[in-house]
Image: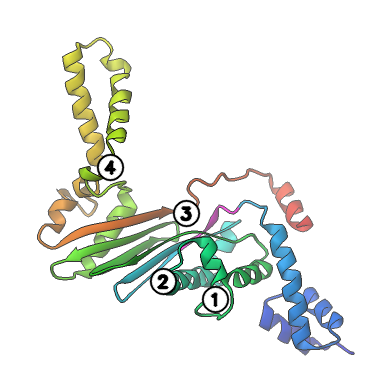
């Protein structure tokens, strides 16, 4: 059967496959569009499995908030070029929506569930996206809140994401958005001192006590200096004690006094903890040609 250019164009539009791949699939399927799509899916799955050994440390963070619920997800890819691709961003946003609606226990559980938008298993949607885009893509982690009061979010250029839950006297979206922005900027680890484990404080004391500038000071003086230093360090790590990023003359505790209470927050930094592979450009190109 003659494979017309219009058929190749139609198959490409439906699948996102390359021109030669689409033509080969149509030839193999003897011009049957449905069978050709199946051929591409099968080849895409195999291609996706081969790509999963690569390192994916780029990507984006996406979030969605709706009806006192919120979800945030980190989706990784291999290059910043793909991370800026609208198709990839749409996929990340779709995964944030899936987390919100499906409430999965883990990424593994989530991938076995049907996507609320595509109506097919997320693991299949993911493999199809890998086949279309041509890079390893992973859903790395997510956070999901189901709140009694307020949830808000802030995403900075897809690189830093914050999800925040508060209890408010009068819900003020601008206030909670400002708190999200502050968390993104100042990277607190805890809400208040009460959350800090004793082991963390003791470790900081041990480090400070061993510093050279205190070695010759009397024991009682060293202890007072160390207490002051550790106090300052802990204040820097607690959200409520940090100076508000938009007005350093007040702390976050002063900013929210009588207005709201911070219940919890999550802060994602894209690719944190992922070891990035260093390759020269020629090797990278060759590896992608061979892959």
Q: Quadrant of residue 23?
A: bottom right
Dot 4 corresponds to which residue? 237
Q: Residue sitting at 69 percent across and 48 percent down? A: 281
The front one of 149 and 241 is: 149
- Tell me if label 3 and label 1 are in contact, CB under 8 Å: no
Q: Earlier in the sequence, mark 4 or mark 3?
A: 4
At which x and y percent is residue 150?
25, 68
Q: CA distance from mark 4 to mark 3?
A: 20 Å
Q: In the current view of this chain or complex, which residue is farthest to the left?
A: 258
In the displayed structure image, the side of residue 56 where residue 174 appears, left or right: left
Point out the frontmost of discs 2 and 3: 2
The answer to whether residue 160 of the structure is visible from this angle is: yes
Q: Quadrant of residue 174?
A: bottom left
Dot 1 corresponds to which residue? 114
Dot 3 corresponds to which residue? 270
The secondary structure that most of the magenta stretch takes on is strand
- Tell me if label 4 and label 2 are in contact, CB under 8 Å: no
In the displayed structure image, the side of residue 42 where residue 261 appears, left or right: left
The front one of 264 and 61 is: 264
At which x and y percent is residue 22?
77, 78
């Amino acid at each position: 059967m003659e494979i017309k250019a219009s058929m190749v164009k139609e198959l490409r539009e439906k699948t996102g496959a390359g021109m030669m791949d689409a033509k080969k699939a149509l030839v193999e399927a003897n011009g049957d569009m449905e069978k050709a799509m199946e051929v591409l899916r099968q080849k895409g799955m195999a291609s996706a499995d081969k790509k999963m050994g690569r390192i994916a440390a780029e990507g984006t963070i996406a979030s969605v908030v709706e009806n006192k619920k919120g979800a945030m997800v980190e989706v990784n890819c291999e290059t910043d070029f793909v991370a800026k691709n609208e198709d990839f961003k749409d996929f990340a946003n779709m995964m944030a929506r899936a987390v919100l609606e499906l409430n999965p226990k883990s990424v593994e559980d989530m991938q076995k569930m049907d996507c609320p938008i595509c109506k097919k298993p997320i693991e299949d949607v993911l493999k199809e996206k890998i086949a279309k885009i041509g890079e390893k893509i992973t859903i790395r982690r997510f956070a999901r809140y189901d709140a009694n009061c307020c949830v808000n979010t802030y995403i900075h250029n897809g690189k830093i994401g914050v999800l925040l839950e508060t209890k408010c006297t009068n819900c003020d979206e601008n206030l909670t958005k400002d708190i999200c922005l502050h968390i993104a900027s100042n990277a607190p680890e805890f809400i208040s001192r009460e959350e800090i484990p004793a082991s963390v404080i003791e470790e900081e004391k041990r480090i400070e006590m061993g510093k050279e500038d205190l070695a010759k000071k009397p024991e009682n003086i060293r202890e007072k200096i160390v207490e002051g230093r550790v106090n300052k360090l802990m204040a820097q790590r607690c959200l409520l004690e940090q100076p508000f990023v938009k007005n350093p003359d007040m702390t976050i505790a002063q900013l929210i006094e009588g207005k709201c209470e911070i219940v919890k927050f999550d802060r994602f930094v894209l690719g944190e903890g992922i070891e990035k592979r260093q390759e020269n450009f020629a090797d990278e190109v060759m590896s992608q040609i061979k892959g």
